[in-house]
Image (tube, rainbow, N blue to C red):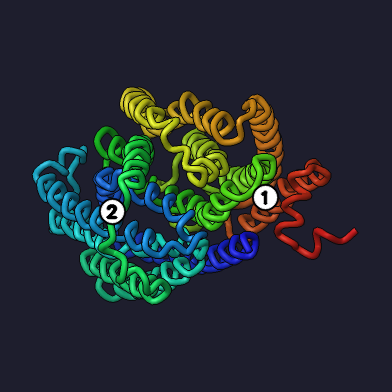
Amino acid sequence: MRSKNSIRNVIVNIGSQLLYIFLSFLCRLVFIRFLNEAYLGVSGLFSNIFTIFSLAELGVGTAITFSMYKPLAENNYKKLGALMGLYKRAYHTIGIVIAVVGLAFVPFYQYFIKEVPDIPNLTLIYLLFLFNSVVTYFYSYKQQIIIADQKVYICSLFQYGFAIAQNVVQVFILILTQNFICYLCTQILFSFFTNYFLARKAVKMYPFLKKYEKERLSEEDRAAIVKNIKAMFMHRIGSVVVNGTDTLVLSKFVGIVSVGIYSNYYLITNTLMNVTKQIFSGITASVGNLGAVEEQKKSYEVYLAINFACFWIFSFCAISLFSLFNPFMLLFTGKQNLLFSLPIVFVIVLNFYTSGMRQATLTFRDAFGLFWYDRYKAVFEAAVNLIASVLLVQHLGVAGVFIGTLISTMTIDFWVEPLVLFRHGFQRSVSAYFRRYALYAAMTFAVGFLTYSCCTFVPGKGFFSFIAKCFICLLLPNTAYLLVFWNTKEFQYLKGFVKIPALHRT
């Protein structure tokens, strides 16, 4: 049952993401054509400001979702209703807090812009971003029970269905009006539709929620949740600072146009990261159930296979990004001045790879509920990232911001996260993890160098040249990994799990 749910979650997530990706790029292409780079920069800046404000969420969502696994397995409707009631009260409070903080911040947001662009109604644009952020908290909490019940594919169908419709409508609005305010209002409307209809779906699927939402948890359960929330809040500090401050530092020290340029690169890396995170979120609940009912050895074997899949996915993506990023951007925007230099692209891709290689470990940590053991890690990560980025941007420019992020990842996350999982989850030495990581990294750099070198021999900068480079990126890394890893236990496990007919022919 776990395998069926995981596979269904992954298939629906990938299918809906592919269509969404295509329309997102189409929408961005139209955006660049009809609005200037400053609008892109403002959009990226305000999005990151509200990413930081989302610290008010405290990690409530992850902590309560983890608490749902056991009562779902036991059909304990009363406890589930009590958990969702707590979720509702917490998220409504968080929404109000973010609204108040966001309004109080209105006089100060321009401080983070080096040169304020000539964009009309800038404060109104900020308030629309605020409204979009706040309204989410009044409906989105109900979908968490669907996720905890291993039915992420249902959420994906709603989310990507409305997101696809949103992109189509926004394209027409940009073509017809060239108005950024109308563009944002469309985004708010579809965001509301997504969360509202998902909330209705959750109530329909779990009718006991209304009956038991006023139930109260035992003191023991509340204490366990509060403990996890305290730990997750610290994790959110690290996540928000690392992911939310790069744009702020760029805007403050380099300029709003650099934020707009980076937003195009970020659109691609974030889209790829979201695709893969959807894959891993689709199996998190199954992993949590696995940890509860299977022996430790089995959990470890599954982890090794998922970590291997993680390597293959992110190594292939990183190699392809480094080889194709600027050729694609030139085709996509048609503007040479919207490209970063190759060293900056290398650091962006390296950050993507190192962040991606953490996903298997984080999936198991979240599923096993090990938030408490590495709670202080996030605080140090946030401090190192912010200090390094601010210092380096003044000497290295744009590259300094991303090098700061890389430093925080490799000096903190790289060591602490696997150590916690292996010590408290698998209860075994972590040395094998680091040896495996070194092997995977060596493979990535070697195959990446070969792939990029082959791509440089392709002449021209047009569409057919780009397609030829895509073919090289698709063929070389995957062929190399098939040859090297075919007989490994991890590959054989995944081959049996995925059940692709071509892989089973002998």
Mark 2 packing: few (<14 Cα in 10 Å), some, or many (20+)?
many
x and y, in percent, of residue 207 in the image: 37, 74
x and y, in percent, of residue 247 in the image: 32, 41
Question: Could you say which disc has been placed on residue 473 in the image?
Answer: 1
Q: Residue at x 65, y 40 (%)?
A: 296
SS assignment at label 1: helix
- Count of marks placed on residues: 2
SS assignment at label 2: helix
Rendered view: 46 above or below 391: below
Q: Residue at x 71, y 43 (%)?
A: 454
From the viewer's perspective, tell me whether residue 114 is left or right of residue 361. left
Q: Residue at x 71, y 59 (%)?
A: 498
Quarter-wise, where is residue 173 in the image? bottom left
x and y, in percent, of residue 402 in the image: 42, 33
From the viewer's perspective, tell me whether residue 159 is left or right of residue 417. left
Q: Residue at x 32, y 48 (%)?
A: 60
Rendered view: 359 above or below 331: above
